[in-house]
Amino acid sequence: MKRNRFLLGAVSGLTVAANADSFFAKALAAPSLPGLPGNGDDRVLVVVNMQGGNDGLNTVVPYGMQQYYRYRPSLGVTPHDVLSLNAQVGLNPEMKSLKAMYDAGSVAIVQGAGYPKPDHSHFRSTEIWQTAEPDTYGSTGWLGRYLDSANLPSANLFNAVAIAQVLPEALLARKVDVPAIPALQGYGLASDKAAGQRTAFSSIIRDSRAPFQSPYLSAVAEIEDHAQRGSEELPKLIAGYKSEASYPATPIGRSLALAAQIIGSKTQTRVIYVQHGSFDTHAAQKTTQDRLLRELSDGIKAFYDDLAQHGNDKRTLTMTFSEFGRRVAENGSRGTDHGEAGPMFLVGGGVKGGLYGEHPSLDDLDNGDIKFTVDFRSVYATLVEKWFARPSQGIIAGTFPTMPLLA
């Protein structure tokens, strides 16, 4: 078997992935890291992947830098339209909801997040952000390593949840299995949809009369069991949840509404992953990016309104990331091509609102790209140590200074 994880796919709603080590090599798993002072047991981290490479320069707009308008004669956001944060930078005008949250002190913006020797490939750069390992090809994700270290209850099927079609690499773990649920409706195994087949798959893989011996059958059986029980339990757990929040009727709005239900339904979930996009705006960027930023901004505002109604806003921290930014100069199709650094947003959860890090210079470029000013692994290390009260060593390779992002 060449791959180290199994994948079960089901029509209209369920993908469950698990690292093979979860079942075949538990004895070899690294011991849990020692705890740090403080109690983060009820805290939740929501990670929003702005997939496709979001253009950071038209998100946190450097309207006070004249070079910006020289590089972007048609795409540049005018100073009159920018939602000013200070004399140099402001938010895209479609992010009014997030700007109101920023003004209330509940949004922190990390400028210029990236990593050394950046890769412009969607696939490789996404892998780097999700594993936090730019110099090697990792087999686990940074959030997966956190889950492995946190001594979470093994009986809980929802220690983490990906609201996505496929389990993201960030949540690949050695000891903790994570369900991927694109939507609550239709969540379940494909075999369960047909009458008389509910137990068929389980019976076949547990049949002791099989004419061969394979260690993988037990792994598939455990995955199938987790998937089937999870599809039965989650609707029951969130059935009584009521919300008065006005979510936008968009994919990100629906995903965040489900995230709020999970958080508010005593599932003891620690990490929720949500995806939004695609931000791969090589042509006609303004229409697409403006819409996506508005949907993100309005969705996050509704999400925190919902959380606050149930007393969950302070224990829920949301972080956004994108695999790279875009090039500084617009292209001939009124779009932008793959670049390097970009902003990250942290919302709620007791963040110390404001701007962090320096906005990258537009005078000192890396072959047409802005240079990163904050290593994204410092943000990750901060969340692991300050939000989850775990040591970042063993979760984030290397040593990275934490940032004063959290109260």
Image (tube, rainbow, N blue to C red):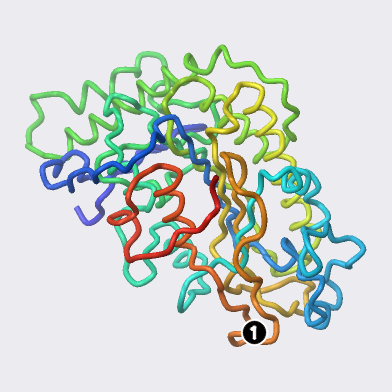
Measured along the vertical axis of the image, is residue 181 above or below residue 63? Answer: above
Residue type indicated by callout 1? Gly
Q: Nearer the viewer, residue 371 or 322?
A: 371
Whether 229 is drawn above or below 112: the answer is above
Q: Is residue 30 left or right of residue 109?
A: left
Q: Tag 1's secondary structure?
A: loop
Whole-percent x, y for residue 35 in the image? 28, 41
Residue found 66% across the figure and 34% down from its top: 304
Q: Is residue 208 left or right of residue 380?
A: left
Residue at 58% x, 85% y is: 366
Name which quarter of the figure residue 283 lies in: bottom right
Instruction: Name the residue carrying label 1.
Output: 368
- In the rendered structure, the answer to whether residue 191 lies left or right of residue 253 reads left
User: Residue 265: percent from the left, percent from the top?
Assistant: 50, 20
Which of the two residues, 344 or 129, is positioned nearer the viewer here?
344
Task: Give 208 or 109, whichever is nearer the viewer.
Answer: 109
Q: Residue at x 70, y 81 (%)?
A: 362
- Residue 85: x and y in percent read 78, 59
Residue toward you, 274 or 357 = 357
Residue drawn 55% across and 45% down? 407
